[in-house]
Image (cartoon, coloured by chain):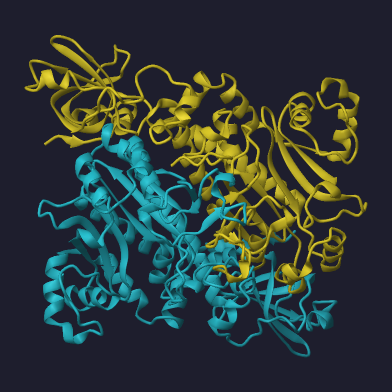
Chain colours: A yellow, B cyan
């Protein structure tokens, strides 16, 4: 009886297994898809990928050992097959092992119209065949890293006792008064009173306010789920649907917040280094040759801190180096400014703190200067802003005044204000765009290429 | 310097720590919320909960040791405080330890209008204050179990190399032709061509079809995300927004599918037994006194299998025992029938297999009898259906014929049919409603009580 193995298991066995174990595994059974089939008169080679490992397994088959040799030699790229054969170490070859087939069976045919042929395809082209692109090296790597990073996030928080909270996607609050939300309805006439929920409903842009309610019960919580923006912009960093991680911690101040952010980013980098070696090597070779070095640097850095006000002073001195030279206290920084600060000034990750209150959200805690709030953005080389967080305003009167100042309808937020009325305490949290993290860690430059089926304006394939 | 500790850490230290360790921890600092404050003239007791553990820590304070004794003794339920004190083992008392406070500071006041007083509140009442109910024992337990179960699911699949895929929430496919979906729009006039996506968009009812595309690349994948139903039904098991887990496996048949389902259910039970001991004890005492026994039984059972046709024969013989006595081959079973089969007939979990094709979805693989499909439902005592799955139809011609028979618009599914055209292989998968799993494992009977902020018809609080 052959041993059922995945390609990953064979690579791991080859790399790490003891000689004894290797000797025990003689005949193996593999199933997967043909990436290439180089056939000769008497001996042929299949590069077999089963999705468990980035590299292919080399399957050797010959007219001598295979009764259906002729047929198999005509199998095209994309064909699904089942292979039984001898597992043989080949330390002198490019492949560390090969499988010498004694049986190859067809599991699913594939004809020449298959859109993924051996040549390299552009990312643009592959976006048009989103249901097939995970079968290419790049996207196999991207989406395995995506999966690993999701696990890294869950492990990081659960190991420290954070409770995972599924905040609602459909909401009656148009959080932060942002107009750019999707409406959720069962009608076509905008008559919300007669609608499913009896009022206007939209897709959430953030789970933070709801997460705060749970932090006031569980102390440390995090969300990890989809969020939505109906923003009509076609850039490489915007999608209508994306995933966010939003931790929220009771009895925490801004320093605590920053410590958790730093730990989390380092944990994620270490996790993919440990669990996605092949993939990271691939990205470093094919996508960004400085990737691993850059991430190594971030992982071993002590993240610095810099107040926004100091950053503005520095940027003003160097304003000639920017496209947007209009630097002033109170401005929202552009990506070029953010990158300059971490890449040129600090030469590493930096927490920018204490932003002007007028460019930040209503719930951020006001500092004693009356002008700034206890907000923080983490800026990292190559990307700019990676994480945004703040200490939250826990003082009921200060919060209510700020909301009135901003013309918000307090009626909609009574439950949120309750969190300050009833044992509200110092607390803080942050938001991390999951796709931004994936792009940062893989070097991929378009958000459409790190989401399985991306949603953007006028694009709803699948 | 006191050691910062959580209530959980103190309980764990008390239960398991060595004497040496306990001796080292003398002064501790705790932060949390007052569940009760029994104050006397000279000595008083605070039951302190910090959300990390179901049980409270007993804080003892006296007029002798506290300068603000008078003030603290008036703190009401719900108040957030910071406590420094001596950690003392009290093996002869009901509490295994107490904290003899030397300092108690106010972190956030709470007045007598606080809706959660010491008495027990009905679940109905607590649903009206969804932002506060996680501060009660029942909901603290429910939502910690929910978080643990999410981790159990991720661990179970990731440990076996399954790739986590985030399938899209906004979709242009109205999967399975179900009419009961929510529309996603930025308009109020139903003019989809001018809408954000340039066509009609809805919220997904299942990620399965998209997951299949990824299974054809990665072999084993799973989704875990929100799904939506615009079903206007107010029952204890329906919500408009809920979370689903949908694994999909290439080169897998129905037997393989069942093996994975069985392993997963047992893994989840073991995980909560290991990680939520206090919570499970609580549910067993307060919610369902047979809960742990029932789950233990399921965990140690070998799940049985029974064809649908056999089940119908059995049910027909016992039809007088049902409310719905109209038993016939081709019917969809009601919960009473499902429960009868597992509770009375099999006396344990049972996989019901090979359902009539006309009551199952188009993508399920047709059996050779021409009447049934390779579908499976897992029925468990106390609940009925817990998981539904099937082998998928991988034969292009059979699938196309079935879709035509059902009057489906094939144009919308060309990408899905591509999965059969290009190396499609035998594959299978299943769907698990996450809330149903939580209800099953906690004994909670209303889906509104296992979702942080539940969405149901005409109910969109928060």
Quarter placement of the C terminus of chain B? bottom right
Using the rendered image of the protein, determine whether residue A169 is visible from the camera's viewpoint: no
Q: Who is closer to the viewer here, A113 or A43?
A: A113
Left or right of A204, for residue B381: left
In the displayed structure, A368 sits above or below B48; it is: above
Q: Residue furthest top?
A: A41
* Residue at image point 53% right, 65% down: B12
Left or right of A163, for residue B371: left
Question: Quarter of the image holding residue B103?
Answer: bottom right
Residue A139 in picture, x, y percent from top left: 44, 30
Q: Residue furthest right?
A: A369
* Residue at image point 22% right, 78% down: B340
In the displayed structure, A197 sits above or below A222; it is: below
Q: Residue furthest bottom?
A: B41
Quarter placement of the N terminus of chain B? bottom right
Residue B154 in picture, x, y percent from top left: 43, 51
In the displayed structure, B103 sits above or below A383; it is: below
Count of all numbered marks drawn on residues in the image = 0
Left or right of B108, for residue A130: left
Residue A248 in picture, x, y percent from top left: 66, 56
In the displayed structure, A285 sits above or below B381; it is: above
Left or right of B209, for residue B371: left
* Residue at image point 39% right, 36% down: A131
Q: Who is closer to the viewer here, B255 or B63?
A: B255
Residue B295 in picture, x, y percent from top left: 33, 71
Using the rendered image of the protein, determine whether residue A60 is visible from the camera's viewpoint: yes
Question: Quarter of the image holding residue B326?
Answer: bottom left
């Amino acid at each position: 009886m052959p041993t059922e193995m995945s390609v990953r298991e064979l690579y791991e066995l080859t790399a790490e297994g003891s000689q004894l174990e290797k000797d025990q595994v003689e005949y193996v059974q593999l199933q997967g898809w043909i990436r290439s089939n180089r056939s000769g008169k008497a001996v042929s080679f299949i590069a077999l990928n089963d999705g468990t490992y980035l590299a292919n397994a080399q399957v050797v088959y010959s007219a001598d050992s295979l009764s259906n040799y002729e047929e198999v030699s005509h199998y095209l790229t994309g064909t699904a097959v089942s292979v039984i054969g001898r597992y043989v170490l080949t330390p002198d070859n490019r492949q560390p092992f090969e499988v010498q087939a004694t049986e190859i069976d067809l599991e699913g045919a594939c004809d020449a119209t298959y859109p993924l042929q051996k040549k390299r395809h552009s990312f643009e082209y592959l976006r048009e065949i989103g249901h097939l692109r995970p079968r290419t090296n790049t996207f196999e790597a991207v989406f395995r890293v995506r999966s690993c990073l999701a696990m890294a996030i869950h492990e990081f928080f659960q190991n420290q006792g954070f409770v995972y909270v599924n905040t609602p996607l459909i909401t009656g609050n148009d959080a932060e008064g942002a107009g750019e939300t999707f409406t959720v309805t069962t009608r076509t006439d905008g008559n919300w009173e007669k609608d499913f929920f009896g009022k206007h409903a939209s897709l959430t842009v953030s789970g933070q306010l709801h997460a705060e309610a749970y932090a006031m019960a569980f102390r440390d919580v995090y969300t990890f789920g989809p969020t939505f923006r109906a923003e009509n912009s076609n850039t490489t960093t915007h999608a209508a649907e994306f995933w966010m991680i939003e931790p929220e911690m009771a009895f925490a101040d801004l320093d605590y917040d920053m410590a958790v952010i730093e730990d989390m980013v380092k944990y994620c980098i270490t996790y993919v280094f440990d669990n996605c070696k092949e993939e990271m090597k691939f990205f470093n070779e094919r996508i960004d040759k400085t990737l691993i070095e850059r991430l190594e640097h971030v992982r071993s850095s002590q993240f610095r801190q810099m107040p926004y006000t100091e950053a503005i002073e520095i940027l003003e001195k160097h304003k000639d180096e920017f496209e947007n030279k209009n630097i002033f206290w109170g401005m929202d920084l552009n990506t070029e400014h953010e990158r300059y600060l971490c890449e040129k000034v600090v030469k590493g990750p930096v927490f920018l703190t204490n932003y002007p209150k007028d460019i930040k959200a209503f719930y951020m805690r006001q500092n004693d200067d009356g002008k700034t709030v206890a907000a923080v953005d983490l800026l990292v080389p190559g990307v700019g802003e990676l994480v945004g967080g703040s200490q939250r305003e826990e003082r009921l009167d200060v919060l209510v005044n700020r909301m009135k100042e901003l013309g918000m309808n307090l009626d909609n937020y009574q439950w949120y204000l309750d969190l300050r009325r009833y044992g509200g305490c110092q607390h803080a949290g942050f938001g991390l765009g999951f796709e931004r993290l994936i792009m940062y860690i893989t070097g991929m430059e378009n958000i459409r290429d790190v989401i399985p089926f991306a949603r953007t304006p006028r694009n709803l394939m699948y």
